[in-house]
C-alpha cells in the first residue's frame, strides 16, 4: 500500500469517526436551524438528522431542568442505533434483543462498543410519527393505495411531525414517565447516544406509522447498572 492509499484510508476512517458538527451546537442553536423544522419524509427519513434531533431534545430537557448538557458519545450512539434498527427489522419492542444474542441486553450492547462507562441506562419508546389529536380516523386512498389519517368531521389530513417536533414529542413522553425521567434527568450521567428508526411501510397499514427510539446514557462512575 503506497503513502497515498494510506492517506486516503486515514481520511476515510477520520470522517467515519468524526463527531457531526450538529452535535457540537447548543440545543437552542440546533433548533433555530431550518433543517430541524422540515417534516419527516416517512418513506425516506434522514435518520442522522433524526438522531441528532433526539440528542438535542434530550439536552433541551436537561437545560430546562437546570442540569448540564450531555456529551455525544459514539459508542453509546452505536449501541442505541443498533437496538433501534433491530426493533424495526424484527418488529418487536423491548430492552432484550433475542435476535442478536451478543446484544441481548443493554449491558451487552454497550459493552460490545466500549468499556469506559461504569454506570449506564437505557430508555426506549415507540411513538407514532403522524401528528394527530387523540381521536382520528384512517381511510384508504384508492388512487395511491395508501392510508390517510384524518379528522372524520372536517376531512383534514394529518401530516408527519417535523424532525424537531418529533424529537421533542418523544422526549416529552419520557419526561412524563417517572422511570424514564429519572434516567434522562440523572445528574450523574455525562454522555448519551440517541437514535430512532421508523416503521418500514408508512401509510400501508390502518394504524399510523411509528418510530422506535432509544437513549443510552453513560457515566464514568462506580454505580449499579439500570435500564428502564
Image: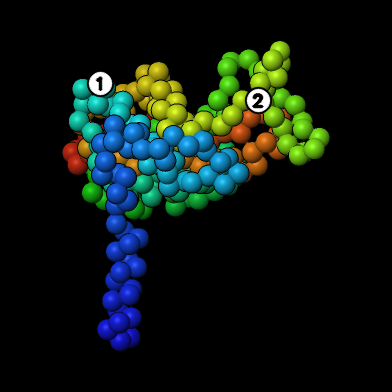
- The foreground one among 106 and 159 is 159
Residue position for label 1? 65
Q: Are marks 1 and 2 in contact (CB under 8 Å)?
A: no
The residue closer to the viewer here, 101 or 157, is 157
Q: Is residue 136 left or right of residue 8?
A: right
Residue furthest out toward the front = 34
- In terms of sequence position, does the residue under pointer 1 or pointer 2 come before the other? 1
Q: Position of residue 188 (x, y in %)?
A: 20, 31
Q: Is residue 103 above or below residue 224?
A: below
Residue 171 visible (yes or no): yes
Most extreme residue toward the right is: 142
Q: Residues within 10 Å of mark 1 (few under 14, many from 20)?
A: few
Where is residue 96? Give x, y as percent. Answer: 48, 39
Residue under the point 77% across and 33% down: 141
Where's the C terminus, which quadrant? top left
User: Splitting the image into 4 quarters, where does residue 22 fall?
Assistant: top left
Mark 2 falls on what kind of element? loop
For the residue labelled by badge 1, is the local secondary structure a helix, a strand or a loop? loop
Q: Position of residue 223 (x, y in %)?
A: 22, 34
- Residue beneath disc 2: 157
Quarter containing the N terminus: bottom left
Image point 36% across, 38% down: which residue? 33
Amino acid at each position: 500500500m503506497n503513502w497515498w492509499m494510506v492517506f486516503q484510508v486515514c481520511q476515510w476512517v477520520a470522517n467515519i469517526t468524526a463527531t457531526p458538527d450538529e452535535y457540537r451546537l447548543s440545543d437552542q442553536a440546533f433548533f433555530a436551524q431550518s433543517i430541524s423544522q422540515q417534516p419527516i419524509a416517512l418513506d425516506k427519513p434522514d435518520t442522522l438528522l433524526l438522531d441528532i434531533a433526539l440528542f438535542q431534545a434530550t439536552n433541551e430537557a436537561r437545560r430546562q431542568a437546570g442540569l448540564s448538557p450531555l456529551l455525544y458519545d459514539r459508542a453509546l450512539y452505536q449501541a442505541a442505533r443498533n437496538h433501534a434498527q433491530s426493533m424495526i427489522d424484527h418488529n418487536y419492542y423491548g430492552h432484550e434483543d433475542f435476535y442478536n444474542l451478543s446484544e441481548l441486553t443493554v449491558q451487552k450492547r454497550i459493552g460490545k462498543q466500549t468499556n469506559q462507562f461504569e454506570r449506564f441506562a437505557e430508555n426506549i419508546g415507540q411513538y407514532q410519527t403522524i401528528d394527530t389529536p387523540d381521536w382520528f380516523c384512517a381511510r384508504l386512498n384508492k388512487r395511491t393505495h395508501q392510508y390517510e389519517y384524518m379528522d372524520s368531521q372536517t376531512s383534514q389530513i394529518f401530516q408527519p411531525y417535523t424532525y424537531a417536533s418529533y424529537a421533542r414529542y418523544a422526549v416529552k413522553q419520557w419526561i412524563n414517565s417517572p422511570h424514564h425521567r429519572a434516567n434522562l434527568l440523572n445528574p450523574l450521567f455525562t454522555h448519551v447516544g440517541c437514535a430512532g428508526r421508523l416503521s418500514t411501510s408508512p401509510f400501508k397499514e390502518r394504524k399510523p406509522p411509528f418510530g422506535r427510539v432509544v437513549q443510552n446514557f453513560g457515566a464514568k462512575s462506580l454505580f449499579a447498572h439500570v435500564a428502564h
